[in-house]
Image (cartoon, rainbow, N blue to C red):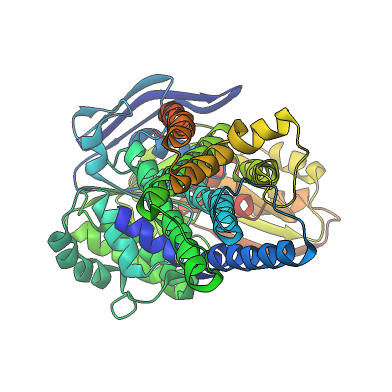
Amino acid sequence: MIGFHLKRASHDLIGQVILILFPLVLIFFFDFLYRNIGIETGMEIGSQNRATVLAIGFALTFQIYASAMSFETLSEDLFTPMHDRLFSTPAEGRSLVLSVLLSGTVVSFMQSCVVLVFSILILGASFPYFPLVLAIIFLSVLFNQLLGTVLLLFCGSPKVANIVTTVYGSVVPMLVGLYFPLPKSAVFRFFRLYGTPMSLANTASLGVMEGNWLQAIITLGPLFGLSVVLFVLLKGLVRRVVV
Amino acid sequence: MVLQVHEVMKRFNATLALDGCSLEVEQGEVIGLLGPNGAGKTTCIRCIIGLIPIDEGTITVFGMHQDGRNKEIRRKIGYVTQEITLYEDMSGKDNLAFFASLYGMGKDEIGARIPEVAAIIGLEGRLTDKVKHYSGGMKRRLNIGCALMHSPPLIIMDEPTVGIDPQSRSFILRSVKELAKRGSTIIYTSHYIEEVEAVASRIYIMDSGHIIAQGTLAQLVARIQGDHIIEVEVRLGSEEVKSRLLSLPDVKEVVLEGNRYRIAVPAGIPILDKILGAFAHVPLVSINTKQPNLEDVFLTLTGKQLRDEVKS
């Protein structure tokens, strides 16, 4: 089943390419901008170079949009006459939903990987403890996919879920300081480092790359916890839509 | 007995979708379920499959109680949805394989079954194409094929020919007959009376959530066999003429559809002059008398014209 959904996802080539090309263009653009106008990104940089931090930031941002692609797929199965076709079979509703979720996770993770690898090759980014960074990226992908699916099932409408995701995907990177520097108040600092799931993943990645393991653990814990909460919510919500 | 639906009630808020619906299907039968839009055909089918719970009554499929959770029942049913439910970006083969996998079929089994199903639906040679490149008729046939992959003993087809060309329709009807010959039990719902006449060994007529008549085509027609149908077309139909016709002795029923009156009278009674008298001063376009068919049975029982319902 997962194989079928992976194949299904791969057919939206334009969507996939956009989710890879767009972040690369933006990383290049913002890196160029910050280098030439003499201001610095609002994100925590530590001892890393700017392209590295921007690459992580945009990879995390576009995972949010990738989750929208997954729930478009899921909504095609759950909120169209396809629902009756699928649930007239003996297949478990939960497996159907999970297989879409899992294939979406795999595709989105691969997109993030491609973005990071291209950032290394083209933009001079470098990621110390790269496998660990990828593990954090994977957890973030999983969180975003779960969030998108929960949103879809909760709203019961792909249109509403799409709007919420778009707003979320626009606001959260701003709070992390991806697009412009934020005021240096404690509230904004909190949002930049811990206040949103993206901040948590971003801070954890930076923590790993800086060798600050405590910071990584402190931020990964809540992200993992939130993912578990979403999974539990998902189980309940799936029961509402499947037969 | 393959299927027994007994006194089933189903409400959607204030709407009573099924009102004491009962039907029985024996092994090897092709049942035609005929009814206008909103008659409750699809609701009835969704209840049989277990997609929606019933409020009252019982449904037994292959001797098993349908409680909506019985996977074994679902394994035995092939459901052809009214809408085309296919993955357009995938190939025909991918679609067949995917739906077969949902029934627990293994890779080898699926590989062996695909050519058989392709032959039934007449899509050999086109299965590697993406569904979005298929014509409407081909999609309809693939839609049927997906429900046949697991060789279900009961096939439920919900309006499988909606919106397709006559060639594809006739191909589908031939396929249904072929499946019936091979021993499949089929429930076939349609708006199209001639389709039901062509494929069904027994017919249920449904209206307003309940079965209003059932039997073979001959049995149903025999219900109004003693009648002749006189159809009178005028420039402008009026309720006044209809009332005049109904007041005539021996006129059993008058249905006015637009500018056409359909008048049921007992056979052998010389009544045409009286009928024409009721049309005094009304310009007539045509007069036609005919033996009743299934369409007349439907009209007599429901007072509704199936096709018009579709158009509206």
Q: In the image, is residue B295 above or below residue A117?
A: above
Q: Is residue B136 above or below residue A188?
A: below
Nearer to the camera, B184 or A123: A123
Number of numbered labels in the structure image: 0
Of the 4 image quadrants, the one containing the C terminus of chain A is: top left
Q: Which of the two residues, B304 or A85, is positioned nearer the viewer here?
A: A85
- Residue B10, percent from left and from top: 47, 25
Residue B23: horizontal and vertical position, in percent? Answer: 34, 33
Left or right, B262 with respect to B109, comes to: right
* Residue found 45% across the figure and 39% down from its top: A212
Please, which residue is most extreme toward the bottom here? Answer: B125
- Eyeballing the image, is A106 above or below B299? below
Is residue B164 in view from this perspective? no
Residue B98 in view, yes or no: yes
| Among the 4 quarters of the image, the one containing residue B168 | bottom left
Q: Residue at x 52, y 24 (%)?
A: B11
Residue occupying the far top of the picture: B56
Residue A20, image x and y in percent? 53, 65
Task: Choose top left, top right, bottom left or bottom right for residue B145.
Answer: bottom left
Q: Quadrant of residue B3?
A: top left
Q: Position of residue A13 (x, y in %)?
A: 50, 69
**Image position of B303 (left or right of A30):** left
Residue toward you, A42 or B235: A42
Which residue is outermost to the right?
Answer: B281
